[in-house]
Amino acid sequence: MAKEVIRQHLPLMEEEGRAAATDDDAGRDRHYLPDVPDEDPYQAGHRTCAGCGPAIEYRWVLKAAGQDTVVAGPTGCMYVANSTYLCTPYTVPWAHTPIASGGSFTSGMAAGYEALIRKGRHPGPYPNIIVMAGDGSASDIGLGSISGALYRNHDALFICYDNECYANTGIQVSPTTPYASMTTFTPFGKAKPEGTSLPPKNLAKMMAAGHPHCYVATTTVGYPVDLMNKTRKGLNHRGAAFMHCFTPCQKGWVYQTSMTVEIGRRVVEAGLFPVWEYDPADRTYHYFHPPVQRPVTDYLAMQGRFGHMLAEHIATVQQQANRNWETIGMDVPAELRAGEDPEHHKRMREESYSMPLNRGVGA
Ligand SMILES: Cc1ncc(C[n+]2csc(CCOP(=O)(O)OP(=O)(O)O)c2C)c(N)n1
Ligand code: SF4
Ligand SMILES: [Mg+2]
């Protein structure tokens, strides 16, 4: 007789800022992260660049998922830098897949575990099954295989770690590269002073609209508890889940290595990466409303990839941000509305912007 497939349930973490301050066993005040597990299935020993956003995302996702997890990684930086000969940073099973087949490989893992547990050849419970694909893989070369897996509703979490370029092969443009970002395939020059001329593909909205039975969420490395809780919600969801995570790439975006998490918050506060959840039960989007709304220059001016922008390019990006504010149901402050006019701006290298804050605990 077929055995029952038992699912795990991962508890969500408290996210109450300063109010959640608590002492741990060693007497340290852990403030904002009271329930974060000590274990790290993604250990030290990888070879990503200092300040690598995808490495931060990998660590937090696997911290949230825990040891009973299997992971697939399509080709990209997080395959190459994490699987140097005879050395990997994983304490959980991990497999590399071709860049186009993260979705199909993960479908096979999910179907395989179901079959093995039913036949009594794996004791269970059903493991957390995760694939973490770059934006080149998830939004371009491997989009079809991930969409197929979501459509068939395999019980797994499909993650796009989005560094907005094909990083591993030398920072080439990808479908999620933002307007006016410079890549090695979209350099700025006389013909195209803006560099990348197209707006980015809205991958997460595509996934939610196209697969309405799936749990879909966006998050960034600027919000660790949000990222870990959405990981757990995606894994707890019975069926397929998709998470789109904004992960700055220090090498490709050209910024100070210590600013990765700060940039992960600023992109949200600048209105350029809305953070939301799509709940398949009521088929609605639940948007996060950041407490701070910034001009886009506070985000753009921190990164060398935007250093060539002219006033009209900055105005275009501010228009995009203002449309995002409206989409998520927030008012557009007068200063940001005025920023839609090129007259409001200078060249990027002459723009001033607010310096990074020491946000402190819970800020
Ligand atoms: C079919 C195929 N085309 C191209 C490549 C070359 N390639 C290897 S890694 C990579 C970049 C992948 O970009 P992304 O998925 O965004 O991951 P990142 O490197 O940014 O982490 C490319 C194009 C490949 N491995 N397979
Ligand atoms: S190139 Fe970018 S994504 Fe790749 S390891 Fe370096 S910082 Fe990380
Ligand atoms: Mg990428």
Image (tube, rainbow, N blue to C red):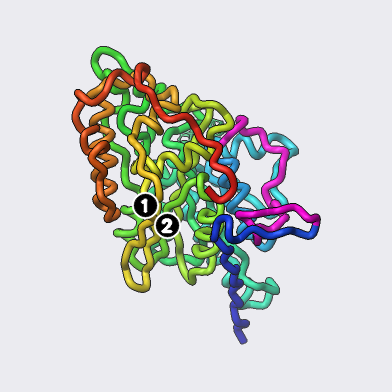
Residue type at mark 2 is: Ala
Instruction: Give the SS element for disc 1.
Output: helix
Would you name the residue on which mark 2 appears?
217
Check contact, mark 1 vs mark 2: CB within 8 A.
yes
Q: Which residue sits at x=54%, y=60%? A: 16
Q: Which residues are magenta?
A: 26-53
Is the residue 281 above or below the residue 253 in the image? below
Within-10-Å neighbours for mark 1: few <14, some 14–19, many 20+: many
Residue sitting at the far top: 190
Q: Which residue sits at x=57%, y=63%? A: 14
Q: Which residue sits at x=66%, y=39%? A: 83
Q: Is residue 28 magenta?
A: yes
Would you name the residue on which mark 1 appears?
204
Q: Is residue 216 magenta?
A: no
Is the residue 314 above or below the residue 139 in the image? above
* Quarter of the image with the N terminus in it: bottom right
Tell me if residue 144 can be seen: no
